[in-house]
Image (tube, rainbow, N blue to C red):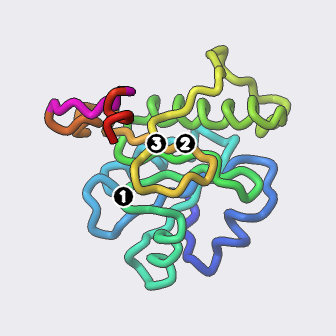
Amino acid sequence: MIKEIEAEDWNREVMAPEEKPVIVKFSGSHCVWCKRLEPIYEKLSMEYKEAKLLNIVIDKSDSNMSLALKYGIDSTPTLKIFYKGSNIGELVGYAELEFLKAEIEHIIRRKETITGRSTRSPSIQAAPEETGGEQGPKQEGKKDDGAAPLNIGDFTGSGTGASGGGEDHDLDIEDIEEQ
């Protein structure tokens, strides 16, 4: 079950020292991709009992919008994953259920690898995959809060890519010496 929250509920619902991850979907009331993600997020909440799932509609109030700005939300839908009040990762954009589950597991396992602490109840086992600490691509202009955002557009072909038009943006040692 997904709980709808407001900015006033944030500290109690998200920042409390929970023993399980908290996944917050930031959505917009007129966002088509947010609406397409709703049934998938609902299935995720029924299948993924290891986490608490919340939703906040950012354009519902000024305080919700301020909260979204505080957490660097500039695109909806965005899923932010928290553990014990710390932001441990995010997923930006629409994705299918299996992809979301796999990426959330990856983020949680990465957190477990870094801290040496499990975010799972003893009955839940991680899928055997590499946990080599590899982070997803960073988004330009976002503050680095220790969480590695994953822009789903980078994997679906909807992103424009880093070079933006085939220009050579590699910096060679000769370029540095010339400056």
Residue at the spot 47% in from the left edge and 62% down from the top edge: 72
- In the shown orientation, is residue 103 left or right of residue 60? right
> Which sits earlier in the primary sequence, circle 3 or circle 2?
3
**Amino acid type, label 3:** Lys
> Which sits earlier in the primary sequence, circle 1 or circle 3?
1
Dividing the image into 4 quarters, which one contains the N terminus? Answer: bottom right
**Amino acid type, label 2:** Ala
The range drawn in magenta is 166-173
Q: Does the residue at mark 3 contact the one at mark 2 (Cβ under 8 Å)?
A: yes
The answer to whether one can see residue 124 in this image is yes
Q: Main secondary structure of the magenta part?
A: loop
In this rendered view, identify the residue nearer to me: 79 or 49: 79
Determine crowd level at label 2: few under 14, some 14-19, many 20+ residues with C-alpha closer than 10 A: many
> Which one is in front in this view, the residue at disc 1 or the one at disc 2?
2
- Provide the residue designation for mark 2: 148
Cα–Cα span, label 3 and label 2: 6 Å
- Provide the residue designation for mark 1: 76
Mark 3, secondary structure of its residue: loop
Determine crowd level at label 1: few under 14, some 14-19, many 20+ residues with C-alpha closer than 10 A: many
Residue at the spot 22% in from the left edge and 39% down from the top edge: 160
Where 136 sits versus 87, above or below? above
In this rendered view, identify the residue nearer to me: 105 or 123: 105
Looking at the image, the residue that sits furthest to the bottom is: 62
- Provide the residue designation for mark 3: 138
Cα–Cα span, label 1 and label 3: 17 Å
Q: Where is residue 138 in the image (x, y as percent from the top left)?
A: 46, 42
In this rendered view, identify the residue nearer to me: 150 or 61: 150
- In the shown orientation, is residue 39 left or right of residue 145? left
Q: Is residue 168 magenta?
A: yes
> Which one is in front in this view, the residue at disc 1 or the one at disc 3?
3
**Amino acid type, label 1:** Thr
